[in-house]
Amino acid sequence: MKLEAVIFDLDGVITDTAHLHFQAWRQVACEIGIEIDETFNNTLKGISRGESLRRILHFGGCEAAFTQPQRDALASRKNGIYVDSLSQLTAQSILPGIHELLLELRERQIPTGLASVSLNAPTILNMLGIAELFTFCADAGRITHSKPDPEIFLAACDGLGVSAQRCIGIEDAQAGIDAINACGMHSIGIGAGLQHAGLRLTSTDQLTWPCLSAFWQHAQ
C-alpha cells in the first residue's frame, strides 16, 4: 500500500514555540494573580487556547470567577502577546531535519499536511519560509473539537483527498498521538514519555525519509 501523505503537527515538530506560548500565558496569568511555571506549561502541550485557559484558571482555583466574555478577553490578550512574539521566528527556528524532510517529500511527490490547532499556523509557516512546502493546512478555525479528538487530522486528510489509513501523522504531544491513532493513521511520536506511538523518536533530526519509509513498510 502506497504512502499517500505525511501530516505534521506544528509546535514541537516543525518549530518550537512552546517558550513563546509560556511567556504569553505566564504574563496573562500573572495579571489575574496566578503563577505558572514551565512544568505546568508542559500540561498545556497540544491543546487549544480555550482549554489552556480553563486549566490555568482551574490551577489558580478561580475557574468559576470568570464569565465567558472575560475568558474570551483573556484568551485574546494572550494571543496578542504571542503573535507579537512571532517576529522572533526565522528559517533558523525550524527544528533539525524538518526542512530537509519536507524537500525530500516534495521531490518524491508525497503530499504534506499540517494539523495544528493553532490559529496562527499559517503566519508561523510564513515566518519560517516553508509555507509552500505544505500541500494543505487544516483550518483550526473550522473544527469543533481539539486534540485528542481526531477532527483536525481528519480535516487534513479531507483537504488532501487521502485516506487516514494511508498516512503517517507526526506529533510531539500525547493528545496528538491519541488523535492520530483515533483516526486510524500511523503515528510517529517525537520525544520521551509518549505512549502508543507506532514509532517513537527522540528528536526531529531522526525524521528522515529512510526512517519514514522503513516505518511505513513495517506497518503494512
Image (tube, rainbow, N blue to C red):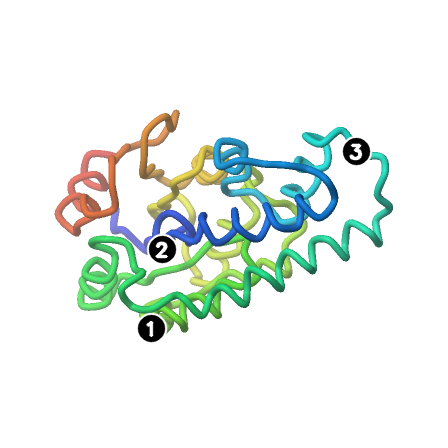
Task: Measure how far apart labels 1 and 2 are at the Cα level.
Answer: 12 Å
20 sits left or right of 168 in the view: right
69 sits left or right of 42 in the view: right
Q: Amino acid at mark 1?
A: Gly
The dot on residue 62 is: 3
15 sits left or right of 141 in the view: left
Q: Residue at x 39, y 25 (%)?
A: 195
Q: Quadrant of the rendered structure where residue 90 is?
A: bottom left
Task: Measure how far apart labels 2 and 3 are at the Cα level.
Answer: 33 Å
Asked whether residue 89 appears in the rendered view, the answer is yes
Q: Quadrant of the rendered structure where residue 75 is?
A: bottom right
Front tag of 1 and 3: 3
| Quadrant occupied by the C terminus | top left
Q: Amino acid at mark 3?
A: Cys
| Residue where numbered disc 1 is placed | 129
51 sits left or right of 12 in the view: right
Element under label 1?
loop
| Residue where numbered disc 2 is placed | 15
Q: Residue at x 83, y 49 (%)?
A: 68
Q: In this orientation, which residue lies closer to the viewer: 156 or 88?
A: 88
Q: In this orientation, which residue lies closer to the viewer: 83 or 10?
A: 83
Q: Residues within 10 Å of mark 2 (few under 14, many from 20)?
A: many
Q: Residue at x 22, y 53 (%)?
A: 96
